[in-house]
Amino acid sequence: MNEDMFQENLQCKNTAGSRTGVLIAALGVLACMSLLLVASLAAEPSPAVEYLMREPVSMLDWGLAQIEEDLFRNRGVLTRHAEDLFEPEPSIRVAYTWEENRIQIFLKLTMQAMVKKSPQRMAAVRKHVEFVIAYLRGGLTMYPYDAFLRHKGFRSKESPQNLDEDLVDITDIHITVCDHQQNILSRCRAPLSGKEIVWSNMGGS
């Protein structure tokens, strides 16, 4: 009889202890959730974030982002037929230079590590860069170039009639060729309109 009572008391104590443990765990979870809720309610945008929230996005910002996205989406063309020369991922950046009033398209091609910088190879690099420039001149102006920098589906009445030509005339293509250690081998600049290419060789050719 005494043994049965002992077992019953022991079972009750275990049940009570288990319930107490569950209760403590639940209280801990509630406490953590309360702290997170208070922290989220107390958090506010920093001055830097508030500034960015107030700054409007201009059609120029939007258009440059669209050009960069288009180039990135078609980046495979930039190394096509030259996979033995260049790494597959070119660097692409598009920006507007206020002081010069120029839209700048910056591309960087990195040579494969095993490629020797021989005169023959550098001549092949130069030929490929000329191909890339010709491709960009044709691809970006095949349709109205200002399509990148205008509203979708309509044209503002305030838009200049010659917006497309004006934007083409102020756009430059810059291509930098680097070796595998990121040493600059050559640079060139070419206006989007016309046939001119200005080379600036830094070595290797």
Image: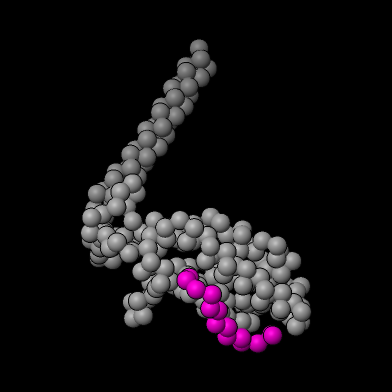
- In front here: 4 or 199? 199
Q: Position of residue 149 (x, y in %)?
A: 36, 59
Q: Position of residue 114 (x, y in %)?
A: 76, 73
Residue 65 visible in the current orientation:
no
Q: Residue at x 42, y 60 (%)?
A: 145
Q: Position of residue 142 (x, y in %)?
A: 49, 58
In the figure, 24 relative to 40: above or below?
above
Q: Position of residue 123 (x, y in %)?
A: 71, 78
Does residue 85 appear left or right of residue 151 in this picture? right
Residue 74 visible in the current orientation:
yes
In the figure, 97 relative to 26: above or below?
below
- Residue 153 lies in the magenta stretch: no
Task: State which region is magenta.
Answer: 192-205
- Residue 204 lies in the magenta stretch: yes
Does residue 93 appear left or right of residue 124 in this picture? left
The majority secondary structure of the magenta stretch comes to loop
Quarter of the image for residue 95 reads: bottom left
Q: Residue at x 26, y 54 (%)?
A: 156
Q: Residue at x 28, y 66 (%)?
A: 48
Q: Residue at x 57, y 64 (%)?
A: 135
In the figure, 187 relative to 95: above or below?
below
